[in-house]
Each structure stands twice: as structure tokens, then as C-alpha cells.
Amino acid sequence: MPTTGRRLAYARWLTSGRHPLVARVIVNRIWLHHFGRGLVETPGDFGRLGVPPTHPELLEWLANRFVQEGWSVKRLHRVILLSAAYQQSSTGDPNLAARDPDNRLLGRQNVRRLDAEAFRDAVLSVSGQLNAEAFGPPVPVMADRVGQFVIGIDNLNAGRPGEVLPMHGQEFRRSVFVQVRRSRPLSVLDTFDAPRMDPNCTARASSTVSPQSLLLMNSDFLLMHASRLAERVQSEAGEELAARIERAWVLVCGRRPTAEEAEEARAFVAEQTAHFEAHPVKDQQPGQLALASLCHALLSSNEFMYVE
């Protein structure tokens, strides 16, 4: 079918390096994902109604380098991640914090909560359940018996959810492959501010509200993967409780526990073991349940959910 070629010409002009905004917008978007805030705080508006860049020279330098290096996103990531600005701690100079409370001048790293999808994927990863399979059809979402939207295949019986159909590991795929429907937002993602995309989302909100704590405490997703994490810790650390506690900390927090944390964890596991011995759960060992409770607490911790 004949075409005028106008779209192709426009695309070539956008990526020619002569357009004044394209490279800047891309660089600002990538910077936003690494720092939680862009050099231009209105990533969807670089015009007069938007906010001016906090570091215009840096934005220009990054944009020029991005184009000169062949629009390589990988190289841009490397430049940003190796920078002194990115590698700072979130605990900065108190005097600087008093002068720049919003950290617009990047005197320290911003404390950022994981995006909803990254949080879900991190839980799957540390529990050893993450399915890294790529491509293919989306992972379906359905309503469960209490009206929450969960991963699963619809199996309605007279309009009500019927028997759960097996998914053969597809339910553990990365969140980017989960079906997105405005009428069925996956509950674990929706609670942690996954955008609804109506009509679009230029920058995500990051709220701290009580439903998030309630989901962490009560959701089947967290409870199941806390148990899976406990099973992984047992298999990798052996029978010694101290080794299990250390392995759980390394998996969830990326570090070994301090002496105080290890002692508190041992006391917690002992207390939980005594509780489950007094209130047994069918086909479950008290020690296993106690370790799962510790893993549940770690998965719900700020250290796991926030990037510092």
C-alpha cells in the first residue's frame, strides 16, 4: 500500500540528534527511575508550564553523551550508576539537609520505596520462586472468593469462582508479564501505587497508607512466599538456628544481621515456636512455622521495601 513516508521522516528527525527535546526527555526519564525524581521534576512537561531543571548543565551533558554514544541506554545506565551522586548514602550532612530539605541539589541519595512490580518480583526472587521465562501470552488475573484480584485462570461456576486451575509455575513470572486490565488491577500491585494508566502516567505516586501494612500482614501472597523463603533457608543453612537467621538476613537484606538483631531474632523464633507448640497447626512443624514468621517479618520490613 503506498505511503507518503511522513511518519518515517518524523521518526528519523526525532532520533537524528537535532531535535531539542528527545534525548533530554529520555535521559530525564532514566534519571527519574534511578533517583526517584528527575532533573526536570515534570517528566511529561518540558515546556513553560513545567518545572525548570535543577541541574541544566548536567542534563545537557548527559543528553549530548547519550546521542554521541549511539543512543545506548546501557551506557547511560552505566554512567549514572557509577556516578558519585548515585553512590551516596541516604544519610547525609545534617547541615546540608537543613539548607536543602527536599534534596534538590543531590547532597545525598533519596530514600525510595520499591515500585509495586519490583517489590513483587523481589519477593518471588528471595523466596526462590521467580520464573524468569520471557515472552508468550500474559499471566491472567482473576477475582478470588473475597473480591480481591489475584493471579489465576477464571473458572466460574454459576458466576462464582470455582476450583483453582493449575498454572504450572506461570503465576511466578515477572510482573511485567502480568495482564494489565483497568477493571482488574492486581491487588498486590494496586495497593503499592501501580498506575492505572487512565489515560497515562508520567510519574508515579508513592504513598504510605494503612492498606499496605494490612496487605503485608494478611495477604496470601506474602504468607505463601514467607513459607517458601523459610523452606529455602532451611535447605541452604542446615539445622543450626543461627545459620538460618543469618541466611534469611542475607537473602532479604543483602547483609548479615548485627549481634543485637541476631539475638532478637533468636528470641522471636523461640517465642513463636512455643506459641505453635501450644497451638499446633495440622501438618506443620512448630519450628518451621516460627521460621516462616521471621521470614514474613523480614519481607515486610522497611529495609526490604526501601532503597537507601
Image: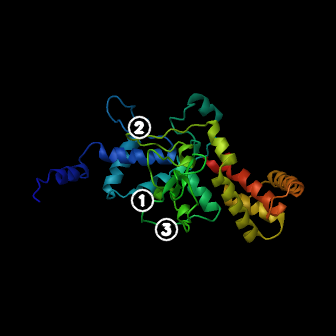
- Residue type (three-letter) at the residue carrying disc 2: Val
- Residue type (three-letter) at the residue carrying disc 3: Glu
Position in image of residue 103 (x %, y %): 54, 35
In the image, residue 208 above or below residue 66: above
Left or right: residue 135 versus residue 117 is left
Residue under numbered circle 2:
40
Residue, x 41% and y 37% (percent of image)?
40
Position in image of residue 197 (x %, y %): 41, 43
Instruction: Say which quadrant the N terminus sits in.
Output: bottom left
Marks 3, 1: nearer the viewer: 3
The alpha-carbon separation of the residues under discs 3 and 2 comes to: 36 Å
Residue 102 found in image quarter: top right
SS assignment at label 3: loop
- Residue type (three-letter) at the residue carrying disc 1: Lys
In the image, residue 37 above or below residue 119: above
Residue 189 is at least partly visible in this image: yes
Marks 3, 2: nearer the viewer: 3
The label on residue 133 is 3
Residue 24 found in image quarter: top left
Q: How is the image coloured?
A: rainbow
Q: Residues within 10 Å of mark 1 (few under 14, many from 20)?
A: few
In the image, residue 131 above or below residue 105: below
The label on residue 74 is 1
**Dots 3 and 1: beta carbons under 8 Å?**
no
**Dots 1 and 2: beta carbons under 8 Å?**
no
